[in-house]
Image (cartoon, coloured by chain):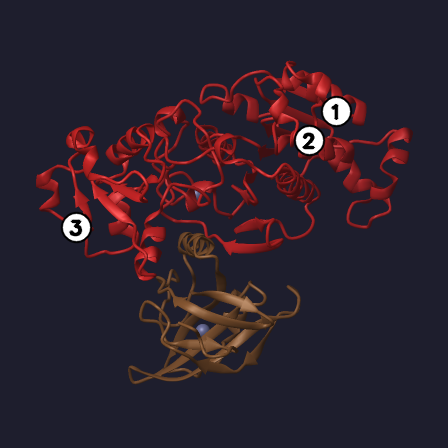
């Protein structure tokens, strides 16, 4: 990221930012950089609320906000930029008003729209840093790819129940979200915060980690969360880091990218902006998780929904009911048991999981990426076809 | 990776998970695949346990962490267990707890007690703890 050209401070701003100006890491020069900076926040919800408040208070000159939602009373438990009188108002209007009250020197640029493949590059072009406060996978992949393609850092955060994660993706030389998760989990297999709940304080904690990383990027100071996924466990109150490397085979930032322009992310994620929680914290199962459960002697029941001729090519075990026969053969399955459904790529089994969940199989999960992912990442002896 | 419980400065291992070495030079260094690490954390949570350590071997090398091992170790309070391997046979096994601050990290050796074999073909190690309950 090119650090913004400093923009001179007025006298009342010097007073306002006095506690920054005395810090050698910020100082007048740093504060002027912050003032010149343009930060885009996608979503004015749980993560966007605290980070917008603090970035505004810290003096970020231009804050772009993309949101088209309306404040609901159930948002107020965590979306602290909105107040009780704002219920029913546009989140954009409520957030902009609150930011003006916090700091009139901040210019708010509202985008009352859903971020789409059509408008993302145009919206992003006027900003230096993008902060991801989205609540669905389609937008998360869109933000990631748009940031990689336009060379802008993507300050990531996610929360679910008592857990959260944060990282800085798409920074020069660093990995992107797809280096860790090349593909989204199949639709219907991941509970949202609305279904699973979230401790109201957690988006505050994680959103402010995002705000901190944003200011560090603008100042060019410190050690940014690049190549590191920070995991926050509020119950244990423990912060852990997982090192992430830039994947040379990444479909968007790798050596031979296959994604060179924005795609249809809702089709890619198989859902119209479906629900989201932080990856790896919920009901979808990765091949690594299944492998670990196998090693632990705690393997869940597997259900192979491929056609009989595919079974002859290779198998990773379990019960076999071809996809089309599942509705008629539900009686063979125990709805109270954990059930991991798989197929070749995870697409058909994703549909089966969505069907099973409708029928009360609350513990049915899809094996993300199916046999192909298993063959790639766990057991190379399994044939790929 | 080693799953189990940590209490009173001791770690009791109940499960040893084999992991792929994601390093491009796997005979000389080791690196965890972040997806496997996230999977292990989720498995531990499901068992009411935590990730208490990491184990690896040094083919033709001593049973103590290398400088690269220290550089790659980031989880304070976890045990880093190293087994020397000579001529394809496992030799000495020692365990080191990551201590100190992020700027000044160091390994502190701890006694290793062998309890009952841990699950999943693990080495039966109980770093710094009483005999494992199994
Ligand atoms: Zn990437
Ligand atoms: Zn080593």
Give the quarter of the figure containing the N terminus of chain A.
top right
Q: Which residue is mark 1?
A: A99
Q: Which mark is residue A52?
A: 2
Does the Cβ of the disc 3 residue fall within 8 Å of ligand 1? no
Chain painted red: A
Residue at the image point whose x is 40% and y is 27% from the top: A265
Identify the residue at horizontal 82%, vertical 44% (top origin). A27
Q: Nearer the viewer, residue A48 or A118?
A: A48
Residue occupied by mark 3:
A383
Could you classify mark 3 by the number of other residues whose Cα lies within 10 Å: few (under 14), some (14-19), or many (20 or more)? some
Q: Colour of chain B?
A: brown
- CA–CA distance in space, label 3 to label 2: 49 Å
Image quadrant of ligand 1?
top left
- In the image, residue B9 above or below residue A241: below
Instruction: Tell me whether circle 1 and circle 2 mark residues in contact (CB < 8 Å).
Output: yes
Task: Report the residue at 62% width, 71% height from top.
Answer: B99
Q: Residues within 10 Å of mark 2 (few under 14, many from 20)?
A: many
Instruction: Say whether residue A352 is visible.
Output: yes
- Rendering coords of residue A190 (x, y %): 41, 36
The chain identifier of the residue carrying mark 3 reads: A
């Amino acid at each position: 990221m090119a650090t913004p050209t400093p923009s001179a401070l007025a006298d009342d701003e010097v007073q306002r930012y006095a506690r920054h100006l005395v810090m050698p890491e910020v100082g007048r020069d740093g504060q002027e950089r912050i003032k010149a900076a343009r930060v885009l926040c996608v979503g004015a919800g749980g993560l966007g609320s605290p980070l917008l408040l603090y970035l505004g208070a810290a003096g970020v000159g231009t804050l772009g906000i993309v949101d088209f939602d309306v404040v609901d009373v159930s948002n107020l438990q965590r979306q602290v930029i909105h107040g009780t009188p704002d219920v029913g108002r546009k989140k954009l209007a409520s957030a902009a008003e609150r930011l003006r009250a916090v700091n009139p020197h901040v210019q708010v640029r509202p985008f009352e729209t859903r971020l789409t493949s059509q408008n993302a590059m145009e919206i992003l072009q006027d900003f230096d840093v993008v902060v991801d406060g989205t609540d669905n996978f389609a937008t998360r992949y869109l933000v990631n790819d748009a940031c990689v393609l336009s060379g802008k850092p993507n300050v990531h955060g996610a929360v679910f129940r008592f857990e959260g994660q944060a990282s800085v993706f798409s920074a020069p030389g660093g990995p992107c979200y797809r280096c860790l998760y090349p593909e989204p989990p199949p639709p219907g297999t991941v509970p949202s915060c609305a279904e699973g709940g979230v401790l109201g304080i957690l988006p505050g904690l994680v959103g402010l980690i995002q705000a901190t990383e944003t200011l560090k990027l603008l100042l060019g100071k410190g050690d940014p969360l690049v190549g590191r996924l920070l995991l926050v466990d509020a119950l244990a109150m423990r912060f852990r880091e997982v090192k992430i490397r830039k994947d040379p085979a990444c479909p968007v930032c790798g050596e031979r990218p296959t994604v060179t322009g924005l795609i249809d992310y809702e089709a890619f994620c198989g859902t119209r902006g479906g629900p989201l929680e932080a990856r790896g914290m919920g009901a979808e199962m990765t091949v690594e998780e299944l492998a670990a459960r196998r090693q632990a002697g705690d393997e869940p029941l597997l259900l192979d929904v491929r056609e009989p001729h595919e079974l002859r090519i290779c198998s990773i075990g379990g019960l076999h009911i071809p996809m089309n026969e599942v509705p008629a053969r539900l009686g063979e399955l125990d709805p109270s048991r954990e059930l991991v459904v798989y197929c070749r790529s995870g697409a058909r089994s994703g549909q089966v999981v969505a069907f099973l969940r409708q029928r009360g199989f609350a513990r049915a999960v899809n094996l993300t990426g199916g046999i192909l992912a298993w063959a790639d990442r766990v057991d190379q002896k399994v044939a790929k076809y | 990776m080693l799953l189990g419980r940590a209490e009173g400065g001791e770690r009791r291992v109940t499960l040893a998970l084999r992991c792929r070495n994601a390093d491009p030079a796997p005979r000389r260094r080791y690196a965890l695949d972040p997806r496997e690490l996230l999977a292990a954390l989720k498995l531990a949570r499901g068992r009411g346990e935590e990730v208490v350590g990491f184990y690896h071997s040094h083919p033709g090398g001593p049973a103590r962490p290398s400088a690269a091992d220290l550089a790659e170790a980031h989880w304070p309070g976890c045990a880093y267990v190293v087994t020397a391997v000579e001529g394809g046979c496992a030799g000495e096994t020692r365990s080191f707890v990551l201590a100190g601050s992020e700027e000044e990290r160091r390994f502190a050796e701890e006694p290793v007690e062998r309890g009952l074999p841990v699950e999943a073909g693990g080495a039966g190690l109980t770093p710094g703890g009483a005999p494992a309950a199994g």
